[in-house]
């Protein structure tokens, strides 16, 4: 039996080793290139794999914004944060510099101070408690003096009549404005019309503040003077609210009992202490008592 013919092809073991290594290296290179191409094709439209230059460009502003937000969020020196309100909240306006200071140094007294002042006034035998029911200012005798325009007291925030002829402007201190009647021979006191910011602790209501202000006006009457009320009513001073008190001041001069007719209007003034317009006229000048009606009906907030 004849032997089978020898195969003309060579097996892997018959190849030289350098050829085998070269073949493996070529195959590995083709595989790597194919995998890279596949990855590019698959990720080309994926936003999470944006080019590094785009990522870097986006990252820079985010760092600046975070820094700016931190600076904005930090409260100014001395500021007090409001609980539950973010400093960056769009619903709350930032505090105006000095707003909190103004609120703390408001002319309104603290509750303790106001209570003490009011309690002291209620115990003062010179000043009886106000009537529980309102009482309107009655028309006083006489004829009102001529007036020319008004005095605009911008310090207090009110306007009042500028009387002519009978009344004369006087140096305002210690008030904001002052008008005086002429001196009467043999009399120690004369009519006076003044305006000023209320010089006593502001109370919770205009009525109580007016009550304390009326007590303060006793400083501008003879020693030992006392009050009886003739009016207590709310008023409108232009567009602002106010309270009017009318009263008779009783005192003794040279052993004789005398009286003065008096009234004050306390006016609520925006962003200021309430304003007081106070007028008092002794019985020695009672022909001018009707000027009190003129003043009280003409007071207006600026």
Image (cartoon, grey):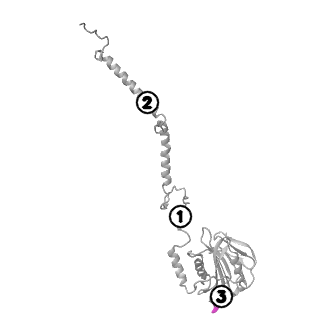
Task: Name the N-terminal-most of marks 2 and 3.
Answer: 2
Number of other residues with Cα within 10 Å of mark 3, as a class: few under 14, some 14 to 19, many 20 or more: many
User: Residue 259's mark?
Assistant: 3
Is residue 188 in sight in this rendering? no
Residue 5 x, y percent position in the rendering: 28, 9
The CA span between labels 1 and 3 is 46 Å
Within the image, what quadrant is residue 283 found in? bottom right
- Residue 204's x, y, as percent? 56, 75
Q: Which mark is residue 78?
A: none
Q: Which residue is mark 2?
A: 38
Residue 26 in percent (x, y) is at: 37, 21
Residue under the image location 50 percent in, 40 percent down: 57
- Out of 18 and 5, give the one closest to the viewer: 5
Identify the secondary structure beneath mark 2: helix
- Of the pair 268 and 132, the residue shown nearer to us: 132
In this figure, what is the number of numbered marks? 3
Q: Dividing the image into 4 quarters, which one contains the N terminus?
A: top left
Q: Split into 4 quadrants, where in the image is the C terminus?
A: bottom right
The dot on residue 100 is: 1
Q: Which stretch is magenta?
A: 253-260
Q: In the rendered image of this protein, does residue 240 appear above or below residue 166?
A: above
Q: Magenta stretch: residue 258 in it?
A: yes
Instruction: From the image, state whether disc 2 or disc 3 is nearer to you.
Output: 2
* Residue 28 located left or right of residue 165: left
Q: Main secondary structure of the magenta part?
A: strand
Q: Earlier in the sequence, mark 1 or mark 3?
A: 1
Mark 2, Cα crowd under 10 Å, few <14 / some 14-19 / many 20+, is: few
Q: CA distance from mark 1 to mark 2?
A: 66 Å
Q: Secondary structure at mark 3?
A: strand
C-alpha gap between disc 2 and disc 3? 111 Å
């Amino acid at each position: 039996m004849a032997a089978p013919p020898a195969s003309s092809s060579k097996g892997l073991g018959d190849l030289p080793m350098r050829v085998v290594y070269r073949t493996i290296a070529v195959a590995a290179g083709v595989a790597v290139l194919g995998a890279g191409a596949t990855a590019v094709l698959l990720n080309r439209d994926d936003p999470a794999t944006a080019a590094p230059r785009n990522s870097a460009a986006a990252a820079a502003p985010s760092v600046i914004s975070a820094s700016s937000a931190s600076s904005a969020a930090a409260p100014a020196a001395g500021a007090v944060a409001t609980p539950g309100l973010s400093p960056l909240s769009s619903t709350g306006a930032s505090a105006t510099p000095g707003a909190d200071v103004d609120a703390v140094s408001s002319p309104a007294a603290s509750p303790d101070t106001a209570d003490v002042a009011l309690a002291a006034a209620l115990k003062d035998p010179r000043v009886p408690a106000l009537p529980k029911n309102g009482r309107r200012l009655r028309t006083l005798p006489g004829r009102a003096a001529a007036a020319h325009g008004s005095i605009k007291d911008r310090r207090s925030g009110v306007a009042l009549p500028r009387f002519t002829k009978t009344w004369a402007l006087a140096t305002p201190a210690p008030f904001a404005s002052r008008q005086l009647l002429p001196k009467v021979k043999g009399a120690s006191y004369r009519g006076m019309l003044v305006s000023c910011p209320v010089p006593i602790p502001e109370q919770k209501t205009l009525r109580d503040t007016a009550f304390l202000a009326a007590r303060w006006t006793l400083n501008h009457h003879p020693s030992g003077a006392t009050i009886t009320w003739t009016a207590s009513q709310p008023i409108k001073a232009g567009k602002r609210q106010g309270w009017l008190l009318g009263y008779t001041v009783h005192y003794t001069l040279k052993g004789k009992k005398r009286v003065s007719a008096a009234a004050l209007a306390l006016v609520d003034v925006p962003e200021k202490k309430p304003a007081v317009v106070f007028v008092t006229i002794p019985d020695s000048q009672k022909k001018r008592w009707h000027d009190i009606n003129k003043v009280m009906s003409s007071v207006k907030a600026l």
